[in-house]
Image: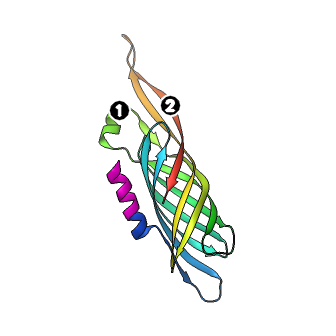
Amino acid sequence: MKSFVLLLFLFAMLNGHSQTTKKKGCDCKYSFTNQLGLAEGQKESFLVQTIHGIKRSSWFGGIGVGIDGYRVRSIPLFLDVRKSFGKKPNGIFAYADGGVHFPWLRDEQKFNYWGDFEKGYYFDGGLGYKIALRKHELLFSGGFSMKQLREVRTNTICPFIGPCFGQSEKYEYVMRRVTLKV
């Protein structure tokens, strides 16, 4: 756990910033953010995300992708909207993410689950604090996240006499957790 916290800190110092480039004729700016985080619910897991989009005054909108290792490893693809409060370079912001995630099971997860996983919904929202560092920003945020997915198990049933037939069982997982990101 200590090595993970150290890795989180180093990643934040190297990549946990937002870089902007102003375009001509518009007060819009291209911006991106790389984040590392932890998700805590029934168990603890890691998050890695990169978000690219457009920043205009105190608003930001972009598209993000990442790796979410909570319970069943998955790749979330989401829209991100952020609102900064106050005119100072340092300050509070609120964010909301919503999209889908695609299951990407590890080998031991494939052994533990018998069915096939389908993509599901992904939501994340919370508050954060940004610290301005010359042309970059260091972001700290905490929030509530939810990911949902479905497992479909198909069993073949053969009675003593007669044809065999398939029976499907569907299991729906809803994972709610608290997230901390840098």
What residue is shown at x 35% (from left), y 32% (from top)? 112
**Which label number is shown at residue 87?**
none
Q: Main secondary structure of the magenta part?
A: helix
Give the residue type that dot 1 points to: Asn
Confirm whether the magenta stretch covers residue 145. no
Residue at image mark 2 = 170
- Sequence-wise, the earlier of marks 1 and 2 is 1
What residue is shown at x 47% (from left), y 28% (from top)? 168
Q: Work out whether 96 lies above or below 44.
A: below
| 67, 35: nearer the viewer | 35
In this rendering, the label closer to the viewer, 1 or 2: 1
Disc 2 secondary structure class: strand
Name the outermost residue toward the bottom. Answer: 24
Give percent across and percent down for residue 177: 53, 43
Is residue 62 visible in the rendered image? The answer is yes
Give percent across and percent down for residue 107: 30, 41
Please indicate whether residue 15 sits to the left or right of residue 176 in the image: left
Is residue 68 visible in the rendered image? The answer is no
Residue 72, by quadrant, is: top left
Disc 1 secondary structure class: helix
Q: Work out whether 17 lies above or below 179.
A: below
Confirm whether the magenta stretch covers residue 3. yes
Give percent across and percent down for residue 49: 46, 60
| 67, 8: nearer the viewer | 8
Graded by Cα atoms within 10 Å as few (under 14), some (14 to 19) or many (20 or more), the crowding at tag 1 reads: few
The residues colored magenta run 1-10
Identify the image's colour scheme: rainbow, by chain, secondary structure or one colour.
rainbow
**Which label number is shown at residue 112?**
1
Give percent across and percent down for residue 169: 48, 27
Give the residue type that dot 2 points to: Lys
